[in-house]
Image (tube, rainbow, N blue to C red):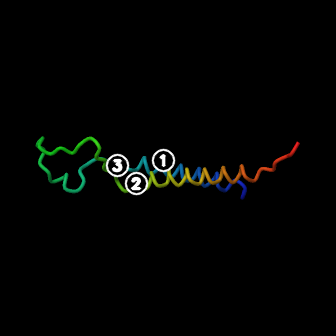
């Protein structure tokens, strides 16, 4: 059990990130965009990204899962014994 704790942690973090993505909503207006008139004079550009706090937390959980996966895989590969011929 203790041997695969990192894999269980990765699975829990991935499930958490999926749940957070499912719960997040990016609908609606944020900040001053809610009060700006709907005219075509405001050019927001194509590179603007507005994310909710839930979506940011989901991305953070995904990144943490990838870090734990890399560390656990590296540790598991490093613990293997080599047999010299």
Residue found at x 19% / y 52%: 33
* Percent of width and height locating residue 22: 42, 46
Left or right of 66? Residue 59 is left
In the displayed image of the protein, which residue is found farthest to the right? 85
Check disc 2 and report the residue beneath it: 56
| Nearer the camera: disc 2 or disc 1 | 2
Which numbered marker is on residue 78?
none
In the depicted structure, whether residue 85 falls above or below residue 61? above
Which sits in the foreground, 39 or 78? 78
Which sits in the foreground, 84 or 63? 84
Left or right of 76? Residue 52 is left
* 10 Å crowding of disc 3: few (<14), some (14-19), many (20+): few
- Which part of the image, by quadrant, shows the N terminus? bottom right
Which sits in the foreground, 51 or 25? 51
Q: How far apart are labels 2 and 3 at the CA level?
A: 11 Å
* 10 Å crowding of disc 2: few (<14), some (14-19), many (20+): some
Check disc 1 and report the residue beneath it: 18
């Amino acid at each position: 059990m203790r041997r695969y704790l990192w894999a269980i942690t990765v699975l829990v973090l991935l499930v958490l990130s999926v749940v957070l993505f499912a719960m997040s909503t990016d609908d609606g207006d944020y900040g001053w965009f809610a009060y700006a008139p709907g005219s075509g004079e405001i050019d927001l550009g194509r590179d603007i990204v507005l994310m909710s706090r839930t979506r940011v937390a989901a991305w953070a959980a995904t990144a943490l899962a990838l870090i734990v996966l890399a560390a656990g895989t590296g540790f598991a590969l490093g613990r293997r014994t080599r047999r010299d011929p």
